[in-house]
Image (cartoon, rainbow, N blue to C red):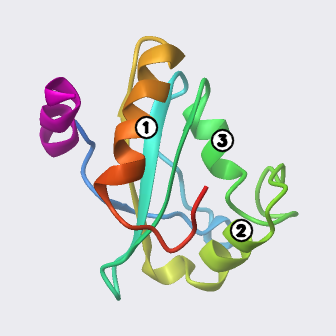
Amino acid sequence: MERFEKLYNTGWSDWKSFPDPRKGEYLYAPLGSGVYQLRNKKTGEFVLYGTSKNLAYRMTSLLPVPLGAGTRNNKDKPDYIFNNIQDIEYRTISFIDNIDAKRFESFVKFAEEYIINT
């Protein structure tokens, strides 16, 4: 747990604005295993977190079809992000394997309160 606390405080990428695909903007995220965290920069609230074996692809599913990959079962996530896209920012952290990513995600789940619970 102590290892994850230190990683949580120092291991993330810098916060970046969530890309708007209508403007041709890019998503910068690991192609392999990792964890993402989104927040609303206008309100300061944390929005969502998640993990995947292919983080970049997973994050594209946060946008509704036809803008994103559109593989989410929960429509609330892509709707919230799309409706607030100008205020959404994200950060990521990569891992060698998905086992560590999943363990870190469990830590992230309780580190903050989120608007959308996964």
Number of marks in picture = 3
To which quarter of the image does residue 24 belong?
bottom right
| Residue identifier under label 2 | 78
Q: Is residue 20 above or below residue 43?
A: above
In this rendering, the label closer to the viewer, 2 or 1:
1
Mark 2, Cα crowd under 10 Å, few <14 / some 14-19 / many 20+, is many
Residue drawn at x 24%, y 51% as measured from the top left: 14
Disc number placed over residue 106 in the picture, else none? 1
Q: Position of residue 31 (x, y in %)?
A: 55, 26
- Specify start and end residues of the magenta stretch as a single range: 1-10
The answer for how far apart the CA atoms under marks 2 and 3 are is 12 Å
Quick check: is 9 in the magenta stretch? yes
| Residue identifier under label 3 | 58
Q: Position of residue 26 (x, y in %)?
A: 53, 53
Task: Indicate which disc, 2 or 1, sits on the residue closer to the N terminus.
Answer: 2
Task: Indicate which disc, 1 or 3, sits on the residue closer to the N terminus.
Answer: 3
Quarter of the N terminus within the rendering: top left
